[in-house]
Structure formats: C-alpha cells, structure tokens
Amino acid sequence: MKFIAFERSKQGTGASRRLRITGRTPGIVYGGTAEPSLIEIDHNALWHALKKEAFHSSILSMDIGGKESSVLLRDVQVHPFKQLILHVDFQRVDATTKLHMKVPLHFSGDDQSQAVKTEGCIANHVMSELDVLCLPADLPEFIKVDLSGLKKGSSLHLADIPMPKGVKAITHGGDKNPVVVSVVVVAAAEAPAAEAPAADAAAKPAAKPAAKAKK
C-alpha cells in the first residue's frame, strides 16, 4: 500500500495540537542508518487506511515529496473517546534485515469439516494472528489456515499450519506448539440425548392412585 506524508518541522505538545486542528496527524519515521524524521499525514486519509488489514501487516510505500521509501506501521495512538488519531510511528525497512511482525490468520473450510457438518461442533479460533520472523520480501499479508480436516475431539496446532516460504513462526512462553483452533461441541447438540429420559417420562400416563378398600 502507498500513502503520502509530509515533512514536519515543528515538534512539541503545542505544535502537535495545532497540527491536529488543521486536520493533520503528527508522526515519526525511525530505523535504519538515517536519523528519525518528523512527518505529518492527512488525518482522514490515515483514518481510512487504518481500517484496512494490509496497512497493519504489510510493507508500506511512503511518499514524501515524490521520494518513496519502504516502512512498517509500528504504533498508533488514538484518543480515548474521540475519533482522533493522536500520533503514528513508522519504521524504515532494510531489505537485508529480518522483521519481527504480527501477521493475521485467515481461516477457511470449517463449514466443510466433519466436526461442523456432522458432529455438532464449532471451530473456536484461539489465535487470530501469529508472530513471525522473515525478510521483508517474504512478509505475507496474511497466513491461510485450512480447517476442512477438523474432527470432534481434535485441535489444530501451530505445527499443523504450513508457513509461507522464508517465514518462521515465533512462540512465547514454554509452549512451542500452541493450539490455534479448538473444536468445541455445541451444547444444543447434546441436549436431546440428555433430555430424552425426561421426555419419555413425560409421555407416559401418570399412574392412577390405588382405590381405598371399603370397610
């Protein structure tokens, strides 16, 4: 994705506040061998760009005065209750340096799985993104996860997901093969079996009280 930014000369709280009043968002670009650069971006354009998944997870082309450079979105500060972006950070991309990024997972095929079609289950997405390490040229916009093989009582682990070429998944903590998708039995699917005895009892006519013997 490509976006347009402008050089920013003034900094400080007061300067940033005045900049936001004019419809611009202050930002910074850092990393690489160059010094950090102060920038400003049209607020509305940035607001709409942030709604796109690719803006968060892919390499962006930043145009400043007709000169383009590759950057990654690293941080966004948003007002706690106003629809206002306060500040944005970008990192320069070096083609020879590996990136540590969060990449979204795109799930498909769960409606074709045995667990969902015939076994009364649903696929519970335990994870929605993965931490990955790769060179900029290998960075995927998203990672596909095929759920068509899910079965009742099984789970999909990280090791079950094929990684794109050049991409390595990074795990945290002691679990090197965490659960990505778990198969959960829908409560309603088990309800008929549990309620069957009660239903049978209700269907039977009530026993008549025994007649009292005449004296």
Image: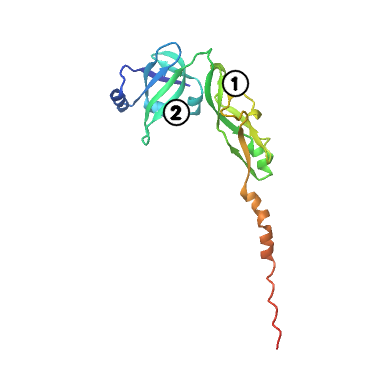
In the image, is residue 210 above or below residue 118? below
Q: Pointer 2: what residue?
A: 50
Q: Pointer 1: what residue?
A: 167
Dot 1: what SS? loop
Mark 2 Cα within 10 Å, few/some/many (few <14, many 20+)?
Answer: some
Q: Position of residue 23 (x, y in %)?
A: 33, 27
Q: Amino acid at mark 1?
A: Val
Q: Position of residue 73 (x, y in %)?
A: 46, 23
Residue at image point 62% right, 19% down? 165
Q: Position of residue 33 (x, y in %)?
A: 44, 10
Q: Nearer the viewer, mark 2 or mark 1?
A: 1
Question: Seen in the image, is 114 located left or right of residue 53?
Answer: right
Q: Could you tell which of marks 2 and 1 lies nearer the N-terminus?
A: 2
Q: Position of residue 92 (x, y in %)?
A: 46, 16
Cα separation between marks 2 and 1: 24 Å
Residue at image point 37% right, 19% down? 39
Dot 2: what SS? loop
